[in-house]
Image: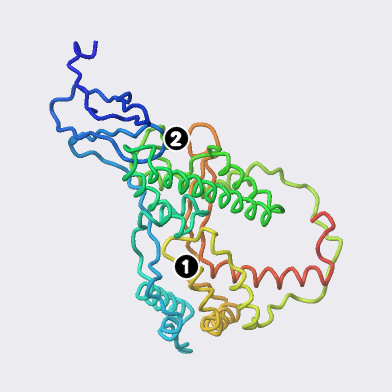
């Protein structure tokens, strides 16, 4: 039947080699004539069958790249980094210009000392299997080299040495994986969200896709694939959610009454450097941040240098009542909930903001909460 379809066998070497026999039982057939085909077997001990492959040199196709960028920290010297990170607070400049200068200097210094580059194959592997150490990868490479020498000459002292090395390495990798997940689960046993993510990863549970929508049905009923139109349509929908919800709230006929009153007004007392330094040290490096902002890791180890400037600019915001324009922006990520992925109402927006927004919001929250709690202005139902 294969001959009648003009199919040709591409694999001609044994794919299963034992002490007694060498057999070809893993086949690839093709009737492709227009493009060149390269095929063969790979010498890896994934199983007792050698893996086979076939590469067709076809026309160019659009392949979605899974590359991501990382910071190259090999040549990073902390002392030199902090020395270059000196920022002069010019009292004559506005809050906006002060903050823009701060961001420009910080990003320039970070890019000079730890430039962005594409992640290497090794970094991708270590991200997928974090329980494997660099030493373990060297051992895997040694095992593969041993297998290349003995895969077709079994029942020899050299092959027996390979089997012992392979079995010991498999046991070490298994124990490392168990210890990694045991430590991870133990340290997050009180965080249900984190624990669910860990267990889902452990059992390979498929989670909802977080990719951006590839097409959206607009308000006029037309379907669009243009990324700019998709972004505008989602922004238009998300920006009107509050207005639509407010229109459905029934108006109260009675007057609003408070159970507690105070004659003392709310006052924002001055922010101290200790407060800012503590909040920076508590920032979570794993939390998503807005694209293009300063990485949290660099902000944390430059804490002592940045704290005086940030404290100064935070206090200026409160006394002058000016919030920097840069911090008024957020990166909106649409997260699919359920249902038809082409309908905007089936997405919920996630706002990614700068770390400085989070720090300033926490400072204001602490002051407002202390005021409300001290004077008993919070209802027992709140």
Q: Residues within 10 Å of mark 2 (few under 14, many from 20)?
A: some
Q: How far apart are labels 1 and 2 at the CA level?
A: 33 Å
What residue sits right under mark 2 in the picture?
Answer: 342
| Residue found at x 54% / y 70% | 356
- How was this image coloured? rainbow
Quadrant of the snapshot with the N terminus? top left
Q: Position of residue 187 (x, y in %)?
A: 67, 57
Labelled pair 1, 2 in contact (Cβ < 8 Å):
no
Residue found at the very far left of the displayed protein: 34
Residue 58 at x, y = what percent?
A: 18, 35
Residue at image point 73% right, 75% down: 266
Tell me the SS state at disc 1. Answer: loop
Which residue is painted at 54% across and 51% down in the image? 172
Q: Nearer the viewer, residue 357 or 21?
A: 21
Which quadrant of the structure image shows residue 227?
A: top left
Please state if 266 lies on the left or on the right of 213 as rendered.
right
Task: Say if 382 sits above or below 23 in the image.
Answer: below
- Helix, strand or loop under label 2: loop
Residue hosting label 1: 295
| Mark nearer the N terminus (1 vs 2) | 1
In this orientation, which residue lies closer to the viewer: 196 or 367?
A: 196
In the image, residue 267 sits, relative to residue 151, either above or below, namely: below
18 or 297: nearer the viewer: 18
User: Which is closer to the viewer, label 1 or label 2?
Assistant: 1
Position of the C terminus, as image quadrant, is: bottom right
Of residues 231 and 341, the one drawn nearer to the viewer in this rendering: 341
Q: Which mark is residue 88?
A: none
Query: Which x, y percent locates residue 252?
Result: 76, 47
The location of residue 146, given as percent across then percent down, is 36, 48
């Amino acid at each position: 039947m294969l001959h009648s379809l003009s199919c040709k066998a591409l694999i001609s070497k044994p794919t299963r080699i034992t002490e007694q026999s060498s057999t070809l039982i893993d086949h690839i057939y093709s009737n492709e004539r227009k493009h060149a085909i390269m095929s063969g077997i790979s010498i890896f001990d994934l199983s007792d069958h050698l893996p086979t492959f076939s590469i067709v040199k076809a026309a160019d196709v659009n392949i979605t790249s899974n590359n991501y960028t990382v910071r190259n920290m090999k040549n990073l010297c902390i002392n030199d980094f902090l020395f270059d990170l000196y920022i002069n607070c010019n009292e004559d400049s506005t809050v906006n210009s002060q903050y823009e200068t701060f961001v420009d200097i910080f990003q320039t210094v970070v890019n000079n000392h730890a430039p962005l580059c594409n992640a290497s194959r090794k970094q991708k592997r270590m991200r997928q299997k974090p329980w494997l150490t660099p030493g373990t990868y060297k051992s895997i490479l040694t095992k593969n080299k041993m297998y290349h020498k003995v895969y077709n000459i079994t029942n020899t002292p050299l092959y027996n040495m390979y089997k012992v090395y392979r079995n010991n390495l498999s046991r070490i990798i298994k124990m490392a994986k168990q210890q990694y997940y045991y430590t991870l689960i133990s340290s997050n046993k009180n965080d249900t969200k984190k624990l669910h993510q860990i267990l889902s990863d452990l059992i390979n549970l498929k989670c909802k896709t977080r990719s951006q929508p590839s097409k959206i049905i607009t308000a006029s009923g037309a379907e669009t694939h243009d990324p700019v139109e998709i972004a505008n349509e989602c922004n238009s929908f998300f920006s009107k959610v509050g207005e639509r919800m407010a229109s459905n709230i029934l108006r109260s006929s009675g007057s609003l009454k408070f159970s507690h009153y105070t004659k003392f007004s709310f006052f924002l007392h001055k922010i101290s450097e200790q407060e800012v330094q503590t909040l920076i040290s508590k920032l979570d490096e794993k939390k998503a941040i807005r694209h293009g902002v300063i990485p949290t890791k660099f902000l944390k180890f430059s804490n002592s240098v940045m704290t005086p400037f940030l404290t100064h600019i935070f206090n200026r915001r409160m006394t002058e009542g000016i919030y920097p324009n840069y911090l008024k922006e957020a990166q909106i990520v649409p997260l699919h909930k359920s249902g038809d992925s082409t309908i905007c109402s089936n997405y919920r927006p996630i706002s990614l903001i700068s770390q400085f927004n989070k720090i300033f919001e926490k400072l204001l929250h602490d002051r407002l909460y202390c005021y409300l709690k001290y004077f008993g202005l919070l209802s027992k139902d709140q």
